[in-house]
Image: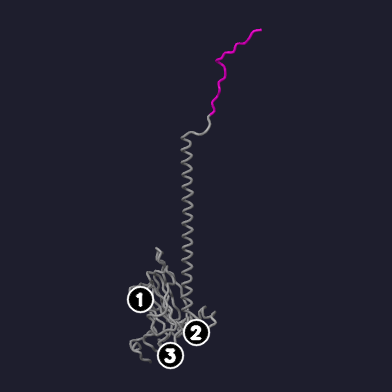
Amino acid sequence: MSTVQRDKRFKPSHIRCRTGVSLLELFVAMAMTAILATAITMAFAQELKIQRSIETRRAQQDRTDAMEKEITRMLRGAKISDSLIDTTSYFQGVDDAGTSAPAGCNRITFTTTAPGVGIASLVSTDDYLTQQTNIGPVGGVAEVSFGTAPVGNAGGQSGLFERIQRPSDGDPTQGGNESLLDPDIASIGFQFWDGTEWESAWDTTVGITTATHRIPQAVQVTYTLSDDEYNTQHVFTVALPSSDVNPQNPYTTPTSTAATGATP
C-alpha cells in the first residue's frame, strides 16, 4: 500500500480574530458621549430656566392681582362726610414731585370704610376700650393713600406703597402705617370720571362747596411693571358706590371764587 505524502505547504494555519476596539474608535465614542451629555445638560438647564421664569411671572401676577384687588376694595369703600366743615374726610388725587405717572396723577389719598374691623379685634375677648389701647382704633373711617413715592423711610425699597391711618386726622400728607404693597410697580397713575370725562386730578379739600365736595363716579388706574421692557400699560377701572356723580349730575370743577372757601 502506498502512502500519501502531504505537503506541509498546504497545512492550514491559525486565523487571528481581532477583539476590542481601536484607539480611534474609543476617541470617537468618547466624543459622541461628551456631545450627547452636553446637549442633555444644556436642555435640562434651559428647562430649569424656563421653569424659574414661569414661577417668577406667576408670583408677579399673583402680586399684581392682589394689588388690584386691594386698591379696588379700598376705593369701593371711599366716603366723605356730608358736612362741609368736616376736614377729616376727603378725596384727593395729586402729583408727587419728581414721580411720573403713565396717566393722570401719581398719588391718591382718600377716606374709606373699607378696612373694616381687623381680625385681631374680631377674635379678641377684650372689651372695646382695652382693644383701643392695645391694638389701636377699631373700625371706623380710615385714611388710605397709594403712591410710588413713600411718605416715610422705605429702607431702600421701591414699588407701590400703601399707607393706612385710622382714624383720619385731617392731614392727607402723612401719618399712619406704610407698607410696600407691590415691589413690581414702576409707575402708577389715577384718573377720575366726573360724569362726562376723565379728569387728571381731584381734590375735595380745595374750593369746598356743595357742588365740589363730592367723590368721582369711577377711578381709572394705569400702571407699568419694572421688568417690562415694552413698558406695557395695564389698566383697570373701579366704580365708587358712594358717589352721586353721573352724566345728569356731573362734577363741577372748583373756580377761583370757590377756592377761597366761599359757598354758593
Look at the numbered discs 3 and 2 and tell me whether their residues touch, using CB distance below 8 Å. no
The total of numbered circles placed on residues is 3
In the picture of the structure, the residue carrying the numbered disc 1 is 96
Q: Label 3, on which residue? A: 83
The reply, left or right, for residue 92 in relation to residue 242 is left
Mark closer to the chain start, 1 or 3: 3
Q: Position of residue 74 (x, y in %)?
A: 47, 78
Residue 150, by quadrant, is bottom left
Is disc 1 surrounded by few (<14), some (14 to 19) or many (20+) residues within 10 Å? some
**Residue 99 visible (yes or no):** yes
Q: CA distance from mark 3 to mark 2?
A: 31 Å
Q: Is residue 195 visible?
A: no
Residue at (47%, 53%) from the top-left corner? 45
Which x, y percent locates residue 88?
41, 86
Query: Of circles 3 and 2, which is in front?
Result: 2
Q: Give the image quarter of residue 252.
A: bottom left
Magenta extent: 1-17
- Give the vertical position of 56 relative to 242 (above or below): above
Nearer the N terminus, badge 3 or badge 2?
3
- Nearest the viewer among 64 and 173 is 173
Is residue 108 rendered magenta in the image? no
Quadrant where the C terminus sits is bottom left
| Camera-nearest residue between 109 and 232 | 109
Magenta: main secondary structure: loop
Circle 3: residue type: Ser
Seen as rendered, the residue at the extreme top is 1
Which numbered circle lies on residue 130? 2
Residue 186 is situated, as x and y percent measured from the top left of the image, at 39, 69
Q: How is the image coloured?
A: one colour
Q: Residue at x 59, y 13 (%)?
A: 6
Q: Secondary structure at mark 2?
A: helix
